[in-house]
Image (cartoon, helix red, strand yellow):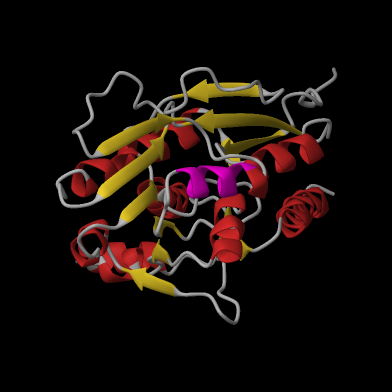
Amino acid sequence: MNNRVPSKSKESQKANILILAGTSEAREVITMLKDDARFRLTASLAGTTKSPASLGVDTRIGGFGGTEGLTAYCREHDISLLLDITHPFAREISRNAVLATAEAGIPCIRYERPEWLPEDGDRWRSFDDWQSMADAIPEGEHVFLAGGTQSIDIFTRRDDIMLWARALNVEGRIAPPNVTFINAMPEETVAEERETFVANRISLLCCKNSGGPASFAKIAAARELGIPVWLLARHRDEIASSAKTPVEACRQATPKLEIHHSVEDVVRGVNHFLNSISEKNK
């Protein structure tokens, strides 16, 4: 009698990797990993872009329902590793990723895009919130706002400045007389951004310190024109400062969180994880 237990198929032995995407770096990582036969890769998009370009892998769109929802998703889909390659200001999903993976007992690799740094001659200021930034603007300034839709309501309350606000999903929105809405992504070239600033006599640029090359053209254009740049600062201590119970403190102390500052290091982290699984299964 043959009592040998049938081995699992190679397909069922593959690791399931979930990547929280929505950035150019996420697309780079997916391109570098999607043909690897050792795992199944699923991408997740928040759904803020109406018609996102295909990522070339299975993609879900929409939120998870907070930490509990993401934890449940990881368990139900047998996720082995979560990659958080979201926008530096996507604070809620990054926080949920850390807590959910700690709860599910799986590792999390997070990509943190390096911040933009000032150079000699730059006139930069950092602010902790949009309200403080908007309140500090002198009367009569010509302001270019590139802070996304969450910042617009705050800045449009200022009726004593001229405001050009660029963001997605503002098409059809009614603008006050002193405000111009630009429904668009950032310009790709410095020349295009410079042309916009010159044409509208922009005297102040307000934006997030997003970092990376994708939206740096506006920073470079402001630098060339000598325009001051006011930046919304990042906050990295939200998880630590939000601990209210010992359980939350334990979640924060998870040793399974890796933070990398380049896509190459993220991919190396994934390979290290997969190699460690292979060693355990020998």
> Residue 46: x percent and y percent?
44, 31
Q: Position of residue 103 (x, y in %)?
A: 40, 51
**Near-viewer residue (10 or 184):** 184
Viewer-closest of 94 and 161 = 161
Dominant SS type (magenta): helix
Q: Residue at the location (52% across, 45% down)?
A: 86
Task: Please state the total of marks drawn on the protein image.
Answer: 0
- Report the residue at 43% width, 44% height from top: 200
Q: Give the residue at x 20% y 34%.
A: 177
Q: Quadrant of residue 188?
A: top right
Can residue 258 be seen? no
- Relative height, residue 281 to residue 69 (above, below): below
Q: Which span is picked out in magenta?
A: 192-199
Q: Residue at x 70, y 55 (%)?
A: 266
Is residue 5 left or right of 158 when viewed as pictured? right
Up-down: is 198 above or below 171?
Answer: below
On the image, the x and y values in percent for residue 207 come to 41, 55
29 up-or-down from 248: above or below: above
Of residue 176 and residue 272, the one placed in the foreground of this image is 176
Q: Is residue 35 magenta?
A: no
| Whether residue 253 is visible | yes
Quadrant where the N terminus lies? top right
Residue 222 drawn at (x, y percent): 53, 60
